[in-house]
Image (spheres, grey):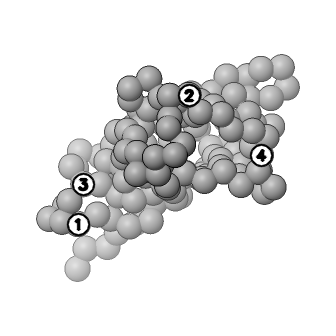
Amino acid sequence: MEKNYFKKIIAQSVDDLNFISMCVSGGKVKLRDIKYLPKNKIFLLSTNRPINEDESSKRIDSIVSFYYIQSSKSKNIDQNNQDLALELTAIDVFKVKNNYKIVIVFTSDRFITLDAEAIEVKLDDQELIDDKNT
């Protein structure tokens, strides 16, 4: 019986966030699986991502949680199309004065920019995908 060990990675620096970016690169996201909770200052993104950390061709469902988010803006994303399929390419971060701009980059020149008080991002693997059904 094969045991699955799911990752829980917390990023609190640019280098940490770069590792999470590498992990989620190539992830598939539906617009309906992206949520911003302004009262809680949390931004959630659910993705079906390849396991980029090893040589396998398996995929895993993961949730990326961004904390201390002050605002969220999107570019070239139709908010009315909840079935819109996006492909993640990277997560970048820039320091602007005392805050951070976290840019979630998708293919087709689509972006989500988060204004954050600090870098606090968590990657939680949820479920290994049965590649026979994908």
Mark nearer the N terminus (4 vs 1): 4
User: How many C-alpha atoms fall within 10 Å of the one at disc 4: few (<14), some, or many (≥20)?
Assistant: some
Camera-nearest residue between 108 and 17:
108
Helix, strand or loop status at disc 2: strand
Residue visible at 31% across and 73% down in the picture = 3
Q: CA distance from mark 4 to mark 3?
A: 32 Å
Q: Residue placed farthest to the bottom in the image? A: 1
Left or right? Give the position of 16 relative to 119. left
From the top left corner, tell me how far across and down residue 36 is, in percent. 66, 51
Left or right? Give the position of 129 relative to 88. left
Camera-nearest residue between 5 and 106:
106
Mark nearer the N terminus (4 vs 2): 4
Q: Residue placed farthest to the front in the image? A: 80
From the top left corner, tell me how far across and down residue 59 is, in percent. 29, 54
Q: CA distance from mark 3 to mark 1?
A: 8 Å
12 versus 133 height, above or below = above
Mark nearer the N terminus (2 vs 1): 2
The residue under label 2 is 75
Between marks 4 and 2 in the image, the one whose residue lies nearer the viewer: 2
Helix, strand or loop status at disc 4: loop
Q: CA distance from mark 3 to mark 2?
A: 30 Å
Q: Amino acid at mark 3?
A: Lys
For residue 12, what is the image quadrant? top right
Q: CA distance from mark 4 to mark 1?
A: 34 Å
The residue under label 1 is 130
From the top left corner, tell me how far across and down residue 128 is, in percent. 32, 65
Between marks 3 and 2 in the image, the one whose residue lies nearer the viewer: 2
The residue under label 3 is 58
Which part of the image, by quadrant, shows the N terminus?
A: bottom left
